[in-house]
């Protein structure tokens, strides 16, 4: 049987990742962008009928020996375990890898030295960066220039977040920073984006004194499994939020954040404490957030609430400092989650608008 290009593309993906959920298989087959699931299911059916792939009862799709034989030079990037939880984990990684490649980010099993962004699955990254705790939930590492961003598929935002374990991605080994993560990317459901953002920020704000402290202990033993909702720590540095539909365009903003802020700052004073802001034009301190960094919103809310408390204390010499934030238009619902913050006298809001 002669396979079409989209069918070969799906088999090739499974030759590297072994498993993928059925809906994601249909998305991979949809190279024309029709969205016609019935037609796509007809394109999928010959692959199982002729023994290239097999569809399991749990909804996963696995490659068969006949399918693997089509790409003999291609070695699997991750191995398949025996239990169902391991299979789900592999499908999470496989689905994210497929999404990355649809967004123009190729996958690799090792560091390539390329300046173009590429994605390394979590199982491969663990071999590159020893010491990552076993309970981490990241699905891979996005490498782009000097950025190493841990990628998470958080779905509807309800997951058992491993606050301490995720911090192991930011450990240094023998004083080397070559494998230390520089931030995170959360990929969530499109229709829940703003609700998820507000919930993560709210959970962090409730415990901000602890979570935003600079102290960090590197552990070499497994930590207790956590059942807490997603919370952010200062150790994570940057936590960008995106969706499957926006990933392609958002990556351009995420990977150019430093250049954008540098251009925006111009001759203003750079501040090296992220909790205080990015730069200062007295009496204003500016938080620049061109890529929906949730941790930066936490810093902004925390700084303004602290200032509001000082102003309400009626002290003899009230602080003269004021705050400004630069944000994406779609983030306005996030900014509105704390009305008292927007009521700060002198607060300035600036929207990023594409040229």
Image: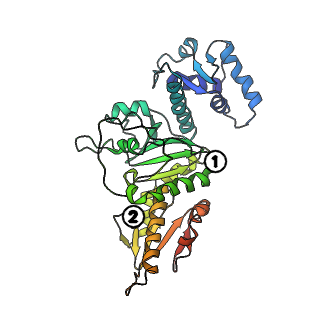
Residue denoted by label 2: 275
Q: Nearer the viewer, residue 161 or 299?
A: 161
Nearest to N terminus: mark 1 or mark 2: 1
> What's the residue at 55%, 12% (across, down)?
65
Using the image, determine if residue 197 lies above or below residue 352. above
Residue 19 visible from this viewpoint: yes
Query: Judging from the image, what secondary structure is the residue with disc 1 in?
Result: helix
Which quadrant holds the C terminus?
Answer: bottom right
> What's the residue at 43%, 53% (across, down)?
238
Q: Nearer the viewer, residue 147 or 318?
A: 318
Residue 309 location, x and y as percent? 45, 75
Residue 35 location, x and y as percent? 73, 36
Please identify the residue farthest to the left as the structure is shown: 174
Tell me which corner region of the image, top left, top right, bottom left or bottom right, holds residue 198.
Answer: bottom right
Q: Nearer the viewer, residue 165 or 39?
A: 165
Residue denoted by label 1: 190
Query: Judging from the image, what secondary structure is the residue with disc 2 in?
Result: loop
């Amino acid at each position: 049987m002669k396979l079409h290009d989209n069918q070969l593309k799906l088999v090739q993906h499974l030759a590297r990742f072994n498993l993928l959920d059925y809906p994601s298989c249909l998305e991979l087959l949809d190279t024309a962008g029709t969205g016609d699931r019935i037609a796509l299911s007809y394109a999928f059916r010959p692959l199982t009928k002729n023994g290239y792939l097999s569809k399991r009862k749990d909804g996963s799709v696995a490659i068969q020996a006949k399918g693997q034989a089509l790409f003999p030079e291609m070695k699997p990037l991750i191995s398949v375990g025996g239990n169902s939880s391991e299979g789900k984990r592999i499908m999470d990684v496989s689905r994210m890898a497929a999404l990355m490649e649809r967004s123009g980010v190729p996958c690799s099993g090792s560091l390539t030295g390329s300046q173009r962004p590429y994605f390394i699955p979590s199982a491969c990254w663990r071999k590159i960066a020893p010491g990552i705790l076993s309970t981490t939930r990241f699905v891979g590492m996005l490498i782009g220039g000097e950025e190493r961003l841990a990628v998470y598929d958080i779905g509807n935002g309800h997951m058992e977040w491993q606050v301490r374990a995720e911090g192991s991605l930011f450990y240094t080994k023998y004083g080397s920073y070559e494998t230390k993560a520089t931030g995170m990317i959360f990929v969530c459901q499109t229709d829940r984006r703003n609700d998820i953002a507000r919930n993560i920020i709210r959970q962090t704000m409730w415990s901000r004194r602890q979570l935003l402290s600079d102290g960090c202990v590197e552990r070499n033993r497994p930590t207790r499994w956590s059942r807490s909702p997603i919370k952010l720590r200062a150790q994570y540095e940057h936590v960008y939020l995106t969706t499957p539909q926006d990933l392609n365009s958002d990556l351009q903003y995420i990977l150019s954040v430093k250049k954008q802020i540098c251009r925006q700052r111009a001759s203003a004073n750079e501040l090296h404490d992220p909790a205080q802001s990015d730069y200062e034009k007295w009496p204003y301190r500016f938080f620049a957030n061109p890529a929906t960094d949730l941790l930066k919103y936490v810093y902004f809310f925390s700084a303004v609430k602290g200032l509001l408390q000082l102003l309400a204390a009626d002290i003899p010499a009230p602080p003269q400092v004021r705050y400004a934030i630069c944000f994406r238009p779609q983030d306005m619902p996030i900014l509105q989650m704390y009305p008292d913050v927007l009521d700060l006298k002198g607060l300035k809001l600036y929207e990023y608008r594409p040229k």
